[in-house]
Image (cartoon, grey):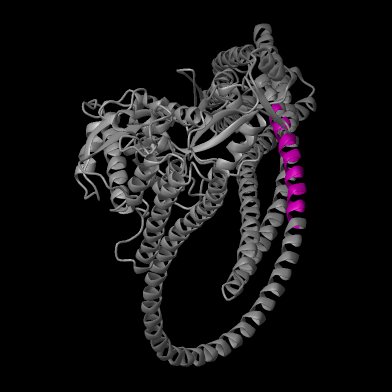
């Protein structure tokens, strides 16, 4: 049982027993995990392991790609196997084994379709053919190659006596062949097919190539869809078909086939699947000037499997001892053909006008065979000789070739002589048959042997005739090449003359270039000196960078110290805030206001009583009620003195804190000096950096310049960061200075109020002491009256005024420091104290 096989860029198709089967010509690469291998085995999927990867092919590749979110790759992207993939041959064998299986019998014939070498691209299909042949042999088949287009002709041109133009529009390639009764007489291979359309449309529409391929299969060229993809597909299909027609017109010889009437055209392959390909191809062929007239254009039934079915026809005929030549795979001009004569009755002549001659066979060879039979067949042999005498000349010999004509003349003369000798021999055999049968038979046997030798000589002459034809063709080619070489020699002579003139100009240019080279050498020396200077500058900059690094570390230490100082100031501020909160406590403020109001009222009462006592001071000496009033006023004055003492203590505490802040402010002054020194260092460093950049501008080494500039940029960034830190420190120090200044003013005012209060208290004590020196009761009452009046005027009013001023200053400072509640309380106390002071005066 024979088999037909076709492996294209998209599918591998096998034909056997009137049925076909196909697998995708794709593979997927998977990891060699135990789980993956078990899944492949359980699915009966064949795979190949290479290193850390497992490769599955065919339809299973698409299934496992979806399962593992992998991507399938085409095994034959261009339709021809190349050696650039290590596992390519093994994967091809695995695919063939998967789609074709093993042969039922060892040496089962298989015909496999392959593309010819492309005429529009580099490379060949030799590696592809040999690999397929070797792998099919390893599987147990007896392989034979056949042109893919020829296979299409065998599948689609049976009704035309296997004569016409067969075109295989494959996925990876396009092949065309002219068939003359099953024999390919001219072929054209192109490295462009349906996959080219897929790639162009995918790029133009930004769609996955597999999606475009699926849409192409369902496309209708005569009624394209209205969407954008349909229009793009139509454009590129027309472009491909026009390209194929132009290549056919360019590469098919005019005298390839001698046939009257138009030639039928059969089309098949992956790119022939869409509807409307036949009329579109007919239009493309009509637009160009072909060397022959073409007739109807038809797409083969099931175009994707046509090549495999045609390869099956060839393999079947070969298996039936058909005349398909068994050529070596390294012969690029292999000519597999279909022997239609094998289907005729055995007694019918093989050279009949209604039967195709096998490819590679010659009419002269058929003549010799018939003649050999006719040697014992009498008149039948003569008839065979006459028939083939006309066809003894090779159809490829040119009419104007004198050498071929001589050979043909010799051949005809020899045939005529041979026929005469045969006739004479036949007569003599009849005359001597009765008398000397044995002797005649012997002599005739000798003559037959001699004639057999002459027939062999004629066969040699025929072979020589074919060789002469080949030599003539080679001579024609050689003559053409000589003419072309002569034209090239003349062109070269002209170019040499031009080159001589150009060489003189080049000599002058060389001299000028030498001078420029010398000048450039001097400039190089200067640039080297500049580079040395730059290197020295870079070393100096490196030293400066190291110094900056030390300075930065010192600044970081200073910043850390300053942070600690700031934290301490914040703690002190919080403590001061707590003290101010205590001072602003609502209950204390209310009590103080109540006491001030009581004192104020009492002072008013005392003032009234003092006025009454002024009118009658003498009468009041023994008045007990007045004495009690004076004593009561003295007691309240003592209470005021106690509160004054408490305020003095608090003022002293505030003064101590202010002193502490003064010390920290002085420390900030030292930090100002450090910051100023650092700024001076930074400015100096920036000046040196600018000087280095100026020096670098003259350097010739671009890479060194870029590296140094990058280092300088990094240094400048560090300097900017330091300057930013210094600015932050200055801002913090300035804020601290402002707070300290306000604290100083508040402390100063508190000190002044305290000093004034101390002076007033001292005056009261002096008055008290003077009163103690007087022994009489009247003098004591008078002292108390005077003391009360002096207390109102000199003690209570100044103290209240000073406390009011101090409270207002402290409230303002607290408000500036954003202690709003404390500031409001202090301001309220200050206003109350000032009111008391005004009323007393």
Q: Farthest residue toward the top? A: 625
Query: What is the magenta range?
Result: 551-574
Q: Compared with residue 621, is residue 833 higher up or lower down, i.e. above or below? A: below
Q: Compared with residue 342, is residue 358 higher up or lower down, i.e. above or below? A: below
Quarter of the figure that contains the N terminus: top right
Q: Farthest residue toward the front? A: 435
Residue at 37% x, 26% y: name it: 303
Residue 491, image x, y percentages: 37, 80
Judge by depth and name the residue closer to the eye, 342 or 482: 342
Residue 244, image x, y percentages: 32, 44
Residue at 42% x, 50% y: name it: 422
Q: Is residue 412 left or right of residue 88?
A: left
Q: Which is the main secondary structure of the residues drawn in magenta? A: helix
Residue 171, image x, y percentages: 42, 34
Q: Is residue 323 left or right of residue 283?
A: right
Judge by depth and name the residue closer to the eye, 387 or 810: 387
Observer able to see residue 764: no
| Residue 223 magenta-highlighted | no
Q: Quadrant of residue 268?
A: top left
């Amino acid at each position: 049982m024979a088999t037909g096989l076709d492996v294209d860029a998209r599918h591998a198709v096998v034909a056997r027993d009137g049925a076909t089967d196909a697998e995708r010509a794709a593979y997927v690469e998977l990891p060699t995990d135990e789980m993956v291998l078990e899944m492949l085995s359980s699915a009966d999927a064949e795979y190949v392991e290479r290193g850390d990867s497992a490769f599955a092919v065919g339809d299973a590749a698409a299934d496992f790609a979806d399962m593992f979110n992998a991507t399938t790759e085409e095994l034959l992207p261009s339709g021809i196997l190349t050696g650039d993939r290590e596992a390519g041959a093994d994967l091809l064998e695995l695919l063939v084994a998967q789609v074709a299986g093993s042969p039922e019998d060892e040496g089962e014939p298989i015909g496999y379709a392959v593309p010819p070498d492309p005429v529009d691209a580099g490379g060949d299909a030799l590696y592809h053919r040999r690999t397929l042949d070797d792998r099919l042999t390893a599987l147990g088949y007896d392989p034979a190659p056949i042109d893919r287009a020829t296979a299409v002709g065998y599948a689609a041109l049976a009704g035309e006596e296997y004569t016409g133009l067969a075109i295989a529009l494959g996925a990876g390639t396009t092949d065309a062949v002219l068939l003359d009764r099953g024999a390919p007489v001219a072929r054209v291979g192109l490295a462009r097919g349906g996959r080219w359309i897929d790639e162009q449309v995918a790029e133009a529409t930004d769609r996955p190539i597999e999606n475009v391929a699926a849409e192409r299969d369902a496309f209708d060229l005569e009624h394209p869809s209205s969407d954008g993809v349909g229009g793009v597909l139509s454009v590129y299909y027309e472009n491909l078909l026009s390209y194929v027609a132009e290549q056919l017109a360019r590469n098919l010889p005019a005298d390839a086939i001698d046939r009257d009437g138009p030639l039928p055209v059969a089309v098949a392959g992956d790119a022939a699947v869409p509807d409307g390909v036949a009329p579109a191809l007919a239009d493309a062929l009509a637009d160009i000037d072909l060397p022959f007239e073409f007739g109807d254009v038809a797409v083969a039934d099931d175009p994707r499997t046509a090549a495999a079915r045609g390869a099956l026809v060839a393999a079947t005929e070969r298996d039936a001892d058909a005349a398909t030549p068994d050529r070596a795979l390294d012969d690029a001009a292999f000519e597999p053909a279909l022997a239609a004569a094998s289907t005729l009755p055995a007694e019918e002549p093989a050279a009949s006008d209604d039967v195709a001659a096998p490819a590679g066979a010659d009419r002269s060879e058929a003549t010799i065979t018939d003649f050999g039979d006719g040697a014992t067949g009498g008149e039948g042999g003569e008839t065979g000789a006459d028939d083939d005498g006309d066809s003894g000349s090779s159809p490829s010999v040119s009419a104007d070739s004198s050498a071929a004509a001589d050979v043909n003349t010799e051949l005809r003369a020899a045939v005529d002589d041979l026929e005469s000798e045969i006739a004479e021999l036949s007569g003599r055999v009849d005359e001597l048959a009765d008398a000397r049968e044995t002797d005649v038979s012997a002599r005739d046997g000798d003559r037959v042997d001699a004639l057999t030798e002459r027939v062999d000589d004629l066969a040699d002459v025929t072979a020589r005739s074919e060789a002469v034809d080949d030599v003539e063709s080679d001579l024609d080619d050689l003559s053409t090449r000589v003419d072309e070489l002569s034209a090239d020699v003349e062109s070269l002579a002209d170019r040499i003359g031009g080159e001589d003139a150009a060489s003189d100009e080049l000599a002058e240019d060389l001299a000028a270039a030498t001078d420029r080279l010398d000048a450039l050498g001097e400039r190089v020396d200067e640039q080297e000196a500049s580079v040395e200077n730059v290197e020295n500058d870079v070393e100096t900059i490196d030293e400066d960078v190291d110094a900056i690094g030390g300075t930065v570390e010192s600044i970081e230490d200073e910043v850390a110290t300053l942070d600690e100082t700031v934290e301490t100031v914040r703690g002190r501020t919080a403590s001061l805030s707590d003290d101010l909160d205590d001072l602003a406590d609502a209950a204390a403020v209310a009590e103080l206001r109540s006491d001030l109001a009581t004192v104020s009222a009492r002072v008013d009462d005392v003032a009234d009583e003092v006025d009454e006592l002024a009118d009658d001071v003498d009468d009041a000496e023994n008045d007990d009620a007045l004495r009690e009033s004076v004593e009561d006023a003295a007691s309240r004055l003592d209470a005021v003195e106690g509160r004054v003492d408490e305020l003095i203590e608090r003022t002293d505490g505030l003064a101590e804190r202010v002193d502490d802040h003064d010390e920290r402010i002085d420390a900030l002054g030292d930090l100002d000096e450090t910051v100023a020194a650092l700024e001076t260092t930074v400015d100096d460093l920036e000046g040196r950096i600018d000087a280095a950049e100026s020096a670098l501008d003259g350097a010739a080494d671009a890479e060194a310049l870029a590296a140094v500039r990058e280092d300088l940029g990094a240094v400048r960034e560090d300097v900017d960061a330091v300057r930013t830190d210094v600015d932050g420190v200055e801002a913090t120090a300035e804020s601290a200075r402002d707070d300290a200044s306000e604290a100083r003013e508040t402390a100063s005012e508190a000190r002044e109020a305290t000093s004034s209060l101390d002076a007033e208290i001292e005056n009261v004590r002096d008055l008290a002491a003077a009163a103690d020196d007087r022994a009489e009761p009247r003098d004591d009452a008078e002292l108390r009256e005077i003391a009360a009046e002096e207390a109102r005027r000199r003690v209570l009013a100044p103290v209240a005024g000073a406390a009011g001023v101090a409270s207002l200053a402290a409230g303002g400072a607290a408000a500036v420091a954003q202690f709003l509640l404390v500031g409001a309380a202090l301001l309220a106390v200050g206003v109350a104290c000032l009111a008391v002071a005004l009323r007393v005066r």
